Amino acid sequence: MKEQVEKVLGEIRPSLEADGGNVELVDVTEQGVVKVKLTGACGTCPMSTMTLKMAIEKTLKDRIPEVKSVEQVF
């Protein structure tokens, strides 16, 4: 599943990079929890929680049914 997640994140990345940010995949647990690190402008943006839940998590859950949630690690 990690490869699938990385592929989807690769599709999301250009939008984040356009705003000076990025996302790094840290881990995918057996329970379907995806752990990511937001970097660049996304790491300090006050809207990063919204980006995490409404863009990254929603897209991953829509494309990969096994994904249960996305968590940010620092």
Image (tube, helix red, strand yellow):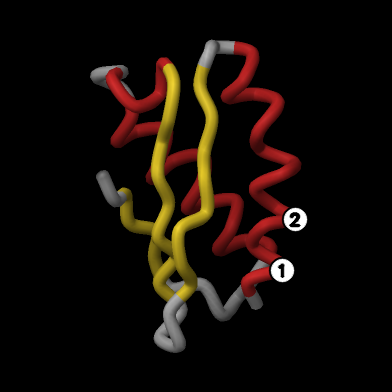
Tell me: 15 left or right of 26.
right
Q: Nearer the viewer, residue 58 or 7?
A: 7
Q: Are marks 1 and 2 in contact (CB under 8 Å)?
A: yes
Amino acid on which disc 2 is placed: Lys
Q: Nearer the viewer, residue 39 or 50?
A: 39
Badge 2: how crowded within 10 Å, few (<14), some, or many (20+)? Answer: few
Q: Check the picture and name the quadrant holding the C terminus.
A: top left
Q: Quadrant of residue 15?
A: top right
Q: Quadrant of residue 37?
A: top left
Q: Real-space Cα distance between discs 1 and 2?
A: 6 Å
**Residue under the point 43% across and 51% down:** 36
Tell me: 69 left or right of 63.
left
**Residue under the point 33% across and 56% down:** 71
- Image height of 30 relative to 9, above or below: below
Amino acid on which disc 1 is placed: Glu
Badge 1 marks a residue whose secondary structure is helix
The number of callouts visible is: 2
Q: Which residue is mark 2?
A: 7
Q: Which residue is mark 1?
A: 3
Residue 49: percent from left, percent from top: 29, 36
Residue 54: percent from left, percent from top: 44, 41
Badge 2 marks a residue whose secondary structure is helix
Q: Check the picture and name the quadrant holding the N terminus.
A: bottom right
